[in-house]
Structure formats: C-alpha cells, structure tokens
Image: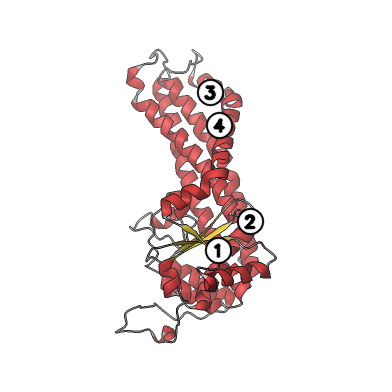
Amino acid sequence: MGAVGLQTHIWANNTRSILLLAGFPVLMILIIYGLQLVLMGIGFLPGSGRGLGDDMALAASWLGGTVPLAMIIAGVWFAISYFGSQAMIDMMTGARKVERKSEPEIYNLLENLAISRGLRTPTLRIIDNDSLNAFATGLHEGQYSITVTRGLVEALTRDELEAVLAHELTHVINRDVRTMVIASIFAGIISVIAELVFRGLLHSRGGGRRDNKNAAPLILIGLAFAAVGFVLAIVIRMMLSRTREFVADAGAVELTKNPDAMISALRKVEGRSSLKGPDEVQQLFLDNQADGVGLEGLFATHPPIQKRIDALVKFGGGVDPGVWTDDPARPSVAYATSTPVAG
C-alpha cells in the first residue's frame, strides 16, 4: 500500500531499507559459492571425482568454513572504518572542522535543530568548494558530523540552509549513516570476492590441475553465481541510498515545518552538486546525479531531484517554484527576494 502521509512514507521506506540490507549476507554467500565453483573448475580446489552435482554439493559443504572467514574479514573491515572513516573522508573530500566562532550562523542553525530533538550537536565541517552539496557521516553519538560545501552556504537562504541541515540531521536521527557504512562494508567484501573470481579465472593458465571433467560447466555456473550476486549487490546498495533520500527530505519537513524551503533548496542544488569523493561517500551526498543514460536510473545512488520535489509537493503540501537560475540577467521571480546566509 502506498504511503498516504509523510510519516507513513518514512515507515514504508525504512521497512524497504531493512529488507534490502538483509539481502547482503545472502549475496555474499552466493558469490563465495561461485568463487569456490570457479576455483574447483580451474583446478585450484579438488573436485569430487564424480558428476557435476557431486562437485556442486562438495563446494556447498565448504561454505560452513568459508562464510565465517568472510564474516571475520568483514568485522576487521568494519573496525577499520569505525575508527578511521572520518579522517579518510576528510582527506578525500577536503572537509575541515569548524567551530561556532568561525561560522556562527550555520552552527546555530544546526545546534537549534539538534536541541529540538534532544540530540548532541554533530560536528560541523565545511568543504571550500563551489558545488552545492552536503552529507552526514559517523557511526555513533559523539562521532556524527555534518558537512556542507561553501557553495551551498553562499547560494542558499537561511531557511533553505536550515532545511538542508535538517535533511542531514534526519540521516543521523534515522541512523542512515550507520546503515550505509554497514552496506558499504558488505559491498566492499562482495566486490573483493567477485574480483577474486575473475582474477582466478584470468590467471588459471599459470597453474592448477586440469583433470576435472566438469571444469567447463563448473566455471560457467560459478561465474553466473558471482556475476548475479555482484550486480544485485550494486543494485541493492543504490536502491538503499535512494530510498533514504526520500525519508530524509520528509524528515527535514517534519523538523522545520517548511516544505517550501526544502523544495527551493533542491531546486538550487539541481545540476550544481558535482563533488568528488569515493563511491561510499558519494552515496551519502545530498544529491549525486550520475551522467549518462540507459541504466542510469537503476544504478544511480540518488533519485532524480524532480521525483524528490514531487514527493514533497504531494506528501508535504509544498509548492514547486520551478527551475532556479543564478543568472543576474535573468532572475527567477520565485527566488528574487532570497538572501544567502553570510559566510
């Protein structure tokens, strides 16, 4: 049943996100199984010496040992991300921590929003970049951080900036950041395992036994398992990010009681959000529209701005002012009285 209001919209998307995230361990098992079949086919793992079904059954029996090993690796990966993720993100994006003294208006907006929900104020960071974007990071209370670009601060009015900060704070409130980090860990493990499958196949000429009569079908079946698992992992991660953006937009409206500010902020961000960063960070951005056509809609980390605005108009009662232009010679009537936040 479709969402009939903002809160129902949030519940529907959260339920969907939980189901999508639950699929990652299944996909990891699928790809590990494919890897074992390929390695058996190229001779690096022993076969049963009997039929294809027996070889596949033997590979399945090994999952009891290989899956826990993969889980341990995922745990180590998580520990590294837990303690070093923010430093790595700052290094890759150029973000720097700022205090109330240097950015009082932005800091006060964020602090007031956090206080309204009884939260500790996240650390504020700024990227000195002309693009219009923002994102939240962190895994627990006291580690959360909200980053905005200088271009965003200069282009948005006070109400619009408050709406964007509320959007990012909603990611913190809903534990979206934690969810996406866990998803990234699984996706990273899956990517490594899938790469091992194909690297093993490419280097199979250098060694291994060739006496398995089921080699060709084992390799083909293994590659099929690995490819399906890898592609589905990418699709799930992208879908997980897209659903969260609708929820965060709705949360911004709930926090600010101002759907028009969120809509106009998205209009200004539209087409101006390009910001460099690793895939795991880009999926956290306020907007991250990929170039290209065809499968773009399937693999994009974010829904189109227009769809997000349509949802805010439908469920939040906001008004769409139309496409924004920052050309002084052609000012948009809807934004003519806008006053940017002082930097």
Q: Which amino acid type is marked by label 3?
A: Ala
Q: CA distance from mark 2 to mark 4?
A: 27 Å
The mark tally for this picture is: 4
Q: At label 2, which amino acid type do we have? A: Thr
* Pointer 1 or 2: first along the chain: 2
Q: Residues within 10 Å of mark 2 (few under 14, many from 20)?
A: few
Asked if residue 247 can be seen in this view, the reply is no
* Mark before the other along the chain sequence, 4 or 3: 3
Label of residue 190 in the image: none
Residue at left offset 42%, top offset 73%? 154
> Local crowd at mark 1 within 10 Å, few (<14), some, or many (≥20)?
many
Looking at this rendering, what residue extends furthest in the front direction? 101
| The C terminus lies in quadrant | bottom left
Distance between the alpha carbons at the discs numbered 4 and 3 = 16 Å
Quadrant position of residue 282: bottom left
Q: Element type at marker 3?
A: helix
Secondary element under disc 1, as helix, strand or loop, is helix
Categorize mark 4 by other alpha carbons within 10 Å: few (<14), some (14-19), many (20+): some
Q: Position of residue 311 (x, y in %)?
A: 53, 71
Give the alpha-carbon distance from disc 4 to disc 1, as whole Å.
Answer: 32 Å
Could you tell me which residue is drawn at 38 percent across and 63 percent down?
129
- The residue that label 2 is drawn on is 15
Residue 168's disc number: 1
Give amino acid for label 1: Glu
Q: Which mark is residue 70?
A: 4
Residue at mark 3: 59
Label 3: few (<14), some (14–19) or many (≥20) C-alpha neighbours in 10 Å = many
